Image (spheres, rainbow, N blue to C red):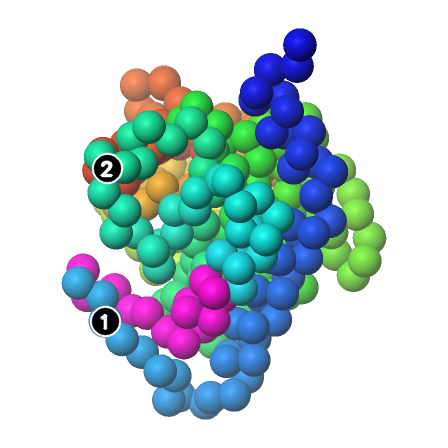
Amino acid sequence: MISVNKAIIYDVKNALESILDIATAAGRGIMEVYNAYDTELIIIHKSDNSPLTLGDRVSHSIIVEGLRSLFSEIPILSEEGRDIAYSERKSWTTYWCVDPLDGTKEFIAKNGQFTVNIALIVNNEPVFGVIYAPAMDILYYGFKEGDSFRVKTGNKEKITIRKGDHRMVAVGSRSHRSTEEEVYLKSKGVTETINIGSSLKFCMIAEGAAQIYYRHGPTMEWDTAAGHAIISGSGGNVLQLDGSPLAYNKEILLNPSFICCS
């Protein structure tokens, strides 16, 4: 008899095009906001003083409505719907982990380096992920037990990590840097660092444009889940500093320091 986990993945693969359409529809909604304002974006500051824009809200609504229409029985944990008590979600074996607009600071700065992140978590592991960069019109997706792909200008191609290169290229955050990161990367023989916003850093590892991403500063589970699945599908790893995999559906949704590597 097919396992529950395999049945869920089977259902996701059957609905794959619809899920990708949800991500791109959310991206179009974001771009409508992005293109409608010059500097007067509607910005609200959340309790942690991080910015929330109309783009976040539009994308959240599109994704939640779309996923519920496809998988009404699978709960959704979204950055814009984060206030679900651990007493409720600790029993979840399967759920969607969503960041409707990752890279809000990049969105406000209008540099195009922001994404839509959708991941499926099964037994506290990301097994499927989608990342869409609407300003660039590039979509990435992948399965932990499968392959990862990039879709650009209508062309789909399989992506894989790059190993055995004499150059060690790191990718880092455009908005968040630390001395610890610089020291760590130097110890690994990094010869070049590319700075880019949002979950695009995961995509660069997955497609072989960089070999290492070390994040010392705080991130949330929805920041990493989709990229984690895509890197896994491309042959890479996302690990805590002790070598264990990054875990999900924790009581505190904050991630520890981690390394993405090929």
Amino acid type of the residue that numbered disc 1 sits on in the rendered structure: His
- Quarter of the image that includes the N terminus: top right
Closer-to-camera residue (151/189): 151
Residue range (magenta): 48-61
Amino acid type of the residue that numbered disc 2 sits on in the rendered structure: Tyr
Number of the label disc, if any, that sits on residue 116: none
Number of the label disc, if any, that sits on residue 45: 1
Determine the residue located farthest toward the top in the rendered image. 1
Helix, strand or loop status at disc 1: strand
Residue at image mark 2:
86
Q: Residue at x 56, y 22 (%)?
A: 5
Give the side of residue 137 with respect to residue 248, left or right. Answer: right
Q: Are marks 2 and 1 in contact (CB under 8 Å)?
A: no
Membership of 55 in magenta stretch:
yes
Tell me where residue 119 appears, x and y as whole percent: 51, 42
Q: Residue at x 31, y 24 (%)?
A: 241
Closer-to-camera residue (173/186): 173
Q: For the residues marked 2 and 1, what is the alpha-carbon distance in whole angstroms?
A: 24 Å
Helix, strand or loop status at disc 2: helix
Give the side of residue 258 with respect to residue 192, left or right. Answer: left
